[in-house]
Amino acid sequence: MAQKGNLMIYRPDIKVLDATIRDGGLVNNFFFTDDFVKALYQANIKAGVDYMEFGYKASKDLFDEKAYGKWKFCEEEDIRAIVGDNNTDLKISVMADVGRTDYKRDIIDKKDSVIDMIRVATYINTIPAAIDMIEYCHNKGYETCVNIMAVSTADSKDVEQALEMLGKSSVDVIYLVDSYGSLYPEQVRELTETYCAVAEKYGKKVGMHAHNNQQMAFANTVESVAFGASYLDATMMGMGRGAGNCILEGILGFLRNPRYNVVYVLKFIQEYMLPLKEQGLVWGYEIPYLLTGMLNRHPGPAIDKIKMGDKNYVGFYHVLWDREN
Amino acid sequence: MAQKGNLMIYRPDIKVLDATIRDGGLVNNFFFTDDFVKALYQANIKAGVDYMEFGYKASKDLFDEKAYGKWKFCEEEDIRAIVGDNNTDLKISVMADVGRTDYKRDIIDKKDSVIDMIRVATYINTIPAAIDMIEYCHNKGYETCVNIMAVSTADSKDVEQALEMLGKSSVDVIYLVDSYGSLYPEQVRELTETYCAVAEKYGKKVGMHAHNNQQMAFANTVESVAFGASYLDATMMGMGRGAGNCILEGILGFLRNPRYNVVYVLKFIQEYMLPLKEQGLVWGYEIPYLLTGMLNRHPGPAIDKIKMGDKNYVGFYHVLWDREN
């Protein structure tokens, strides 16, 4: 294994993506105020963040519009109400789930959109459907990205085959996604090298999306950078489902790239994120997440446990052992 | 760089040290009840933990007995009141700070003590004094250990020289200590390899003591294992000064050694640690610790900031930039 660069230099290929609205939206069903989203957009521009993800491009046929805020759907006019024509260096992305997006209806030509990148989220068993979406979006003129979710549960030979298939597609960036927050740094190093080997062969980039179930989201992101990943997902204060994500305030402090400035992230946190916490939104590491992460399980049962205020960790551990969740 | 072992196997050389009373004592001035310490001792035995650190061997000439609980001083009879003759596989350690321990008076012959290991804590500039203490304790019959604190602020040539000096001493274990929680995994890998190279040359072992200022205590400990460290400090729920330490519940879940059983740690946490939190004891990651860690500073100003309930992170960052703390 070989490291790429070290702490004294910087890697010009690094791109940081703020996923606060998209992954954080899983905490509050995407009910962010326009004031919040506008301030986040401005903070990201000033902090030198490369991409801001506005949310999902979910189909309104499948999800009740009243049950979710607008960033579940990311209509063109809603994004434009925040960014105008987005005459800035900050690029805009949205996530489109395989099977939950009516992409042939809802994803318009890039020339008519302020969106720069479509990120296709897929499990290992829906890679062919993901590739159809990627080709569609690529042909519409977008940068494309694929997030292979829950890779910790996929067989390593399937992962290799999926990477080969994606290598031959038009996708620009392939993301390593630790959905269950179960990967240890040595696994991240190994997977990053596997992804990078294929990416280099086909001229793609590799990204990292980490979860904090075992308090390792930031460390694992840093490890993926050291071993070749260049697209890095993070959120303000790590806001995201369950234990949350890699902390944006951490990753900008770690990176030596001169265009990043962490102070604007700190300013946004104290002015906009702390009030969310005070309003009662809950995310971040707790012991039940450690246990689902440790056992490589979906965090769903841990989220339920924490909502109920149940602190019987021993009982929860037994339940996780005894049943498939 | 070469990894030692991987996640499918286990390393029989691994030793886990529970430092809950010692590092956690910095949170409550060592005022733990006997009931708490007895239950912790039993939990560690059942969980298969290798060492339990009872506290400091501080001089009563230098510290006011009334201001601290008894584990600041670790009198022989106080330890015996918990462990009797300690006829178990769990070994007992105490920490002795250079300059704060009257070791020639307070450290008795090993044959008369239930203590197994003396851990000498030193800064890089007091290595000769540390070696005097090590030789004294070694000659008294104890296992000995040296913790070189705040290594992130030491010049790397000084570290190399200190390691050579310690290599030639009687010390058994040399600890890498990230007092400020400022090290990133790639630095931990590099330092672990530096420490291990000297340790192998002289027949010593290497240990890791991490702090969680940047949410990396557990990840950095895991990284130090992967690159050769074998003595690992951790505490229940990460209890320790400021942002706290590596989580014992995490490290036992990570290690594949068959003698460890994390369930007894979970049981102790829900029965004994959660009440400490409810009583108002405060430790664990917060943004001010990220900032002191990021800037490689002592966490003192962050501890003060958090005690005051001051959430002006931007102002704090400016102050840290502008002055030496």
Image (tube, coloured by chain):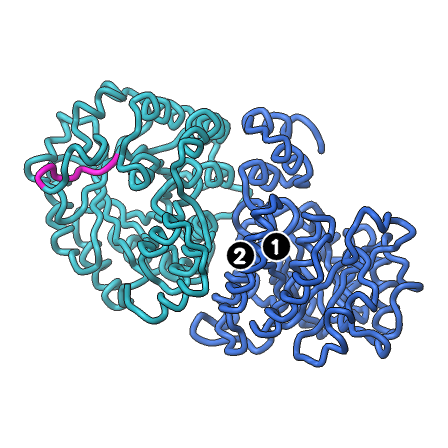
Chain colours: A cyan, B blue
Res. A142 in view:
yes
Within-10-Å neighbours for mark 2: few <14, some 14–19, many 20+: many
Question: Based on the displayed image, in which of its 4 quarters is residue A1 positioned?
Answer: bottom left
Dot 1 amino acid type: Ala
In the figure, A299 relative to B51: above or below? above
Res. B196 in view:
no
> Looking at the image, which residue is at 70% across and 53% down?
B25
What is the chief secondary structure element of the magenta stretch? loop
Disc number placed over residue B210 in the picture, else none: 1
In the figure, B87 relative to B204: above or below? below
Residue A304: x and y in percent read 33, 52
Residue A25: x and y in percent read 30, 37
Residue A196: x and y in percent read 33, 55
- Residues at marks 2 and 1 touching, judged by CB atoms closer than 8 Å: yes
Disc number placed over residue B218 in the picture, else none: 2
- Determine whether the residue tagged by mark 2 lies in a helix, strand or loop: helix
Of the pair A207 and B218, the residue shown nearer to us: B218
